[in-house]
């Protein structure tokens, strides 16, 4: 009977030790879960911040339709300039501008001579 009582006491001590170990493991597990939740929350905050930055950036981008419209206009302008260059239109425009400047200068000279003659005649 003493042997049975000793076994019973040892069995209860083993169960108490196991119960204590389980409690310690549960406390450690709860602490680990809390730490994991905090780490996950921080990660989600940084992900949300990154998403906000992407949204802000996307709001400042030029829409595709507008970009294509501008590029098409630039291509049209380049095509017109290439045709002008190929046909010698640039030289023609320059020649017309030169003639206009010469005519304007000639008119100015004639006007100045006329004013000079008028002053000379009036002073006599």
Image (spheres, grey):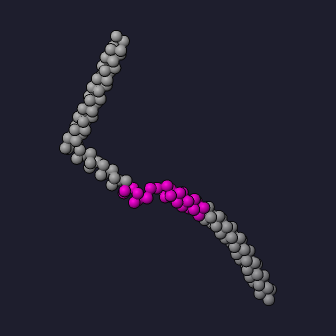
Q: Which residues are magenta?
A: 43-69
Residue shown at 31%/17% (left/top)?
Answer: 117
On screen, residue 106 versus residue 33, left or right, reads left
Residue 8 in which image quadrant: bottom right
The answer to whether residue 109 is magenta is: no
**Residue 97, placed above or below residue 53:** above
Residue drawn 25% across and 38% down? 93
Figure quadrant of the C terminus? top left
Q: Quadrant of residue 33?
A: bottom right
Q: x, y (%) of residue 99?
A: 24, 32
Looking at the rendering, which quadrant does residue 112 occupy? top left
Q: Classify residue 18 as left or right of residue 45.
A: right
Screen quadrant of the N terminus: bottom right
Q: Find out whether residue 50 is within the magenta segment.
A: yes
Asked if residue 102 is positioned above or below residue 24 in the image, the reply reads: above
10 to the left or right of 49:
right
Instruction: List x then y, in percent, for residue 84.
Output: 23, 44
Vertical order, 28 against 80 (above or below): below
């Amino acid at each position: 009977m003493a042997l049975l009582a000793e076994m019973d006491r040892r069995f209860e001590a083993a169960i108490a030790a196991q119960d204590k170990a389980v409690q310690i493991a549960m406390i450690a597990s709860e602490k680990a879960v809390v730490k994991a939740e905090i780490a996950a929350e921080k990660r989600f905050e940084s992900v949300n911040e990154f998403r906000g930055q992407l949204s802000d950036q996307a709001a400042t981008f030029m829409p595709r339709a507008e970009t294509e419209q501008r590029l098409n206009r630039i291509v049209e302008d380049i095509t017109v300039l290439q045709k002008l260059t190929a046909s010698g239109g640039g030289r023609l425009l320059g020649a017309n501008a030169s003639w206009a400047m010469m005519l304007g200068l000639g008119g100015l000279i004639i006007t100045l001579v006329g004013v000079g003659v008028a002053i000379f005649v009036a002073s006599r």
